[in-house]
Amino acid sequence: MLENIFSDPTFQFVLFSAAKIAVVFGVVMTFVAYAVLVERKVSAAIQDRVGPNRTAPPLALKIPVLGRLLQRWGMFQPMADGLKFILKEDFTPAYVRTVYFWLAPAIAVIPAFLTLAVIPFGSTLGSQKMVIADLNVGILYTFGIVSLGVYGIVLAGWSSNSKYPFLGGIRSSAQMISYEIAMGMSVVSLFLIVGDLNLMNLIQWQADHGWLVLYQPVAFVIFLVSAFAETNRLPFDMPESESELIGGYHTEYSSMKFALFFLGEYANMIASSAMMVTLFFGGWSLPWLGKPAETLLGGLVHIGIFIAKMIVLMLVFIWVRWMLPRFRYDQLMDLGWRRFIPAALANIVATALGVALLNR
Amino acid sequence: MQAALPHYLIVSALLFCLGLLGVVVRRSLLVMYMSLELMLNAANLALVAFSHFNQNLNGQVMVFFIITVAAAEVAVGLALIVALFRKRQTSHVEDLTSLKL
Amino acid sequence: MPQLTDLLFYAFAGMTLLFGFLCVANPLSRNPVTSAMFLVLTIISMAGLFVLLHAFFLAAVQILVYAGAVMVLFLFVIMLLDLKEEERRKLNKVAVGLGSLAVLGLAGVLVRVLAGATPLIAAGSKPVEGSTRELGRILFQSYLLPFEILSILLLVAMVGAILLSKKELK
């Protein structure tokens, strides 16, 4: 009886999907926690400071050498941060629109995680494809979900019912709609070359023919900059710019609700890094490692390669944040509408002509 | 019961009626406009259902066109509502009874 | 035993209708933002129905265009105008009653008629897949002219929207 259930393909599908979802969720949460730490350490290095180096749980320092080392690297900092977020007073101002005020942080987090569902983070592990949902409209799904990301921020800004959050909300809705267009258009040229929307096949194509960033540098630059705008990170963090809008859409938030926005921002960063690895840098493949893995070890190596590439791109995100000053809002709109969209369109036309001429 | 063509069509018809209800009952221009979108969506659902059960993709192409037209329509319609609001400071249909601005 | 797809159909259909109702006639709130959010949910559940009908491309486009762009525009405008007006007004009871009655009648007629609908061809053979490739093929072979006209329509809409939102014409 039990064997019957285990050999049932539907049951297996559900089981393996659930396992993949659990693992991806866990890994991403860990990544978020340590991305914050890395961000603080990198910013410290850039500004010639030391960064977090004091936090340590009571018994950790008893471990010889390693304990001190971990403390110096700030490895315990994320735990302390998380604990602090939970223990802080969760304050809801009297004048907010309560239902949306409570919903907004949750809505802000969900899309970031949903995007990860179609990203192939490895080739195969045993008989399983290392992607949660292998859709044939993969990239369209991603853009659909990414476009839902704006709701959390807009609702937060609106429901806070005070001036600065409201301005932040308005800014972010305009900004995210604008850059979504440029982002979507930059990707079209990739699919003109590859001829498939499925992300697994896209990676396999890159493994056979070389990374797409070499074919489409313009598209990559547009996608990268638009990703900064979509994740609301410096130099495009107008929706929350603390020096002019206090904290933008999360001014009125505290404790876990604030932490959720924080989580959403970093999860978005991870999702867009993963997206860029998949689209432009060959996903799990390396130039001499292009075949889907046949052994368990090979599968793990592929996952490792993917994560390594992702970390490099996340470091770029962090590095840019601390190197560039904030744009002015009209400059941001100008860049999006008058530079990137025409450039992306021109890129599509050029690529289409190239593909047509080469295939003749 | 197996979900066949009539099921989808009935859902579509009910959705259309909900949209109509919105247009008839609500008096805010924006909400009425959203109800119109709901009616368009109901039509989309019917077309996709026809396309699936008649095994013909033409219906889906039509939906593609409808979505595009709806997007254009929303852009112009919302611009109109904003322009109207600027002139009259209201978006309530009962306040917008004169033909001349 | 009912199949999984049928259960999913009832789930998505129920969600679509419930959210649709809450969008147009929410008894608890007449706030336009609430309507907009429930419309977003309606659209997302409809995308689920599209997936059940093998229209994968349209499901993605539905979310991308409607939920992602059109509804954000709506939200943007609602916030810009800051509408509190409708909530304070009293509803005209007679109008609401008669309107609902008319809609109910129409719903009754439509359901009566549509309950007997049958497809032109017999079920059983392989269903068509609304994949990007197939849809693109039809779009650019049989529907090329409408497609081009549509692009002109979009251009017209764009120019019109810009013109309308200018404060004064020079």
Image (cartoon, rainbow, N blue to C red):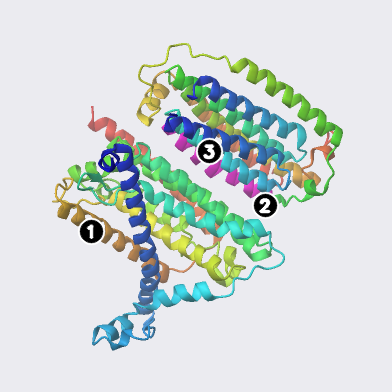
The picture places residue A180, in percent across and down from the top left corner, at: 47, 48
Give the crowd class for mark 2: few <14, some 14-19, many >=20 residues within 10 Å: some
Q: Is residue A139 magenta?
A: no
Name the residue nearer the viewer: C40 or A249: C40
The residue at which mark 1 appears reads as: A304
Compared with residue A209, is residue A31 higher up or lower down, i.e. above or below? below
The quadrant in which the N terminus of chain C is found is top left
**Dominant secondary structure of the magenta stretch?**
helix
Chain of residue at mark 2: C
Q: Secondary structure at mark 1?
A: helix
Where is residue B34? Give x, y as percent. Answer: 66, 38
Q: Amino acid at mark 1?
A: Gly
In the displayed structure image, the side of residue C77 where residue A277 appears, left or right:
left
Look at label 2 and name its amino acid: Met
On the image, numbered disc 2 is attached to which residue?
C79
Query: Eyeballing the image, is A164 above or below C137?
Result: below
Residue B50 locus on image (x, y percent): 50, 20
Determine the secondary structure under disc 2: helix
Real-space CA distance between mark 2 and mark 3, rounded to the nearest whole angstrom: 25 Å
Q: Position of residue A153 (x, y in %)?
A: 56, 57
* Nearer to me, C116 or A239: C116
Range covered by the magenta-colored residues: C56-79
The residue pinned by badge 3 equals C45
> Can residue A233 be spotted in the picture?
no
Select label 2 or label 3 by which is in front.
Answer: 3
